Amino acid sequence: MLAVLTITACGKKSEKKEKAPIKVKTEVVKPSYDGAGQTYVGIVEESEATAVSFTSMGVVRRIFVNEGQTVGRGQLLAEMDPTTMSNGVTAAQATTSQAHDMVAQAQATYNQAKDAYDRMKLLHDNGSLPEIKWIEMETKLQQAETMLKSAQSSVRSATATERIARKGLSDTRLIAPVSGIIGKRQVSAGETAMPSQAVVTILNINTVKVKVSVPEAEMAAISENTRSLIRVEAAGRQVPGGRIEKGVAADAMTHTYDIRVNVPNGDHKLLPGMVADVSLYTGYKSNADAATHSSTYTLPVTAVQRRADGSLFVWTVDQQNKAHRTTVTIGPTEGNRVFITDGLSEGQRVVVEGYQKLSEGTKTVQEH
């Protein structure tokens, strides 16, 4: 009997095993819009377009950029055959050098004349120099001074000509005045570029504008801050629109006005020419006003669960990947999705698949 008790006392306690995380699929909460908006078809445009050209005529020797390439301010885009401009600089340098030699000679002549004048002045003041000699000395000094000034003027003129020639040589290299994306290359190597003829166009697409034609009867309801949603299928993007620019000139044939919706485009996914669906929600003065009155998001209908007391909830996942019941209020359904009007905030993760095995605080892992 004693041996049995001893064995029982020494037995090990069973250890608790930690449960494996539950695999789930989640969806990040993003702003959504109800069906109260009017939808139009728009075209994506760059926010700015800069046409870059040479300032003089010449044969394009090389072009260093291609369409769609990102360029920075100060980057070399193309260069023209510099032979003519280089010869001009050489000739201007020779003229400037000659002008400096003329100044050196004229300065020496003037210095001699001034020295003789100063010595003769002492004699003239003492009455020891005939008047005719004094007048002759004054004339020589004036002539030397005139020659010096003329030579100095020639230097200034030659220097200005050389500066212009150097500028012309520098301008055979086409430099990007702004940063952006090369939109179109309009001249190829070997072709003759004319002054002010665009060689390339640089587009700024960090922000884009979506142009929409709106009937004149609907313009009064649209303001600078009207709430909007932009959908671009080609880029797989659906984003809220920003500030709206309203045109003031109507199309005489269609009686429509152009508006442009500004859209941030830091990843450059939206490209000029893409077709967009633009929904305008004129019932709200702005996106912020709309959010104040109705912070609406949509989720799959199946993600919303009902408690025994009839209240509704969804499973959300926190930063530690733990699941929590979050009470929500729903609005109307649209297809297989339902509008969530209260209880969630943008950026939260909601479980849309795999919620059947969850309980409060369950550890989860994202299923791919």
Image (cartoon, rainbow, N blue to C red):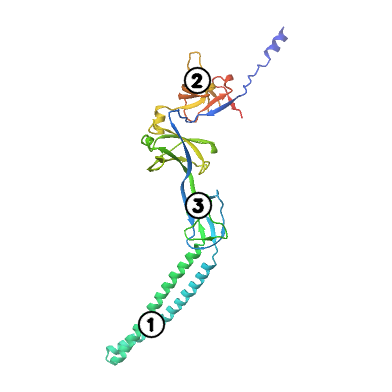
C-beta proximity under 8 Å, tags 3 and 2 = no
| Residue appearing at x 49%, y 38% in the figure | 276
Residue 78, position as x, y percentages in the image: 54, 58
Q: Secondary structure at mark 3?
A: strand
Q: Is residue 51 visible?
A: yes
Dot 2 falls on a residue whose secondary structure is strand
Give the residue number, with chain letter if any, for mark 2. Answer: 313
Circle 1 packing at 10 Å, graded few (<14), some (14-19), many (20+), is many
Left or right for 158, reference 356:
left
- Report, in whole angstroms, how far the alpha carbon at label 3 lies from the one at label 2: 54 Å
* Residue at 50% from the left image edge and 63% from the top image edge: 57
Name the foreground residue: 250 vs 321: 250
Amino acid at circle 2: Phe
Q: Earlier in the sequence, mark 3 or mark 2?
A: 3
Foreground mark, 1 or 3? Answer: 3
Identity of the amino acid at label 3? Answer: Thr
Q: Nearer the viewer, mark 2 or mark 1?
A: 2
Question: What's the residue at 34%, 83% (across, down)?
Answer: 142
Reading the image, the residue beneath label 3 is 201
Query: Around disc 3, counting alpha carbons within 10 Å, would you say few (fewer than 14), some (14 to 19), or many (20 or more)?
Result: many
Q: Quadrant of the C terminus?
A: top right
| Residue ID for mark 1 | 110
User: Looking at the image, which residue is at 52% across and 70% down?
Assistant: 87
Is residue 290 shown left or right of residue 202? left
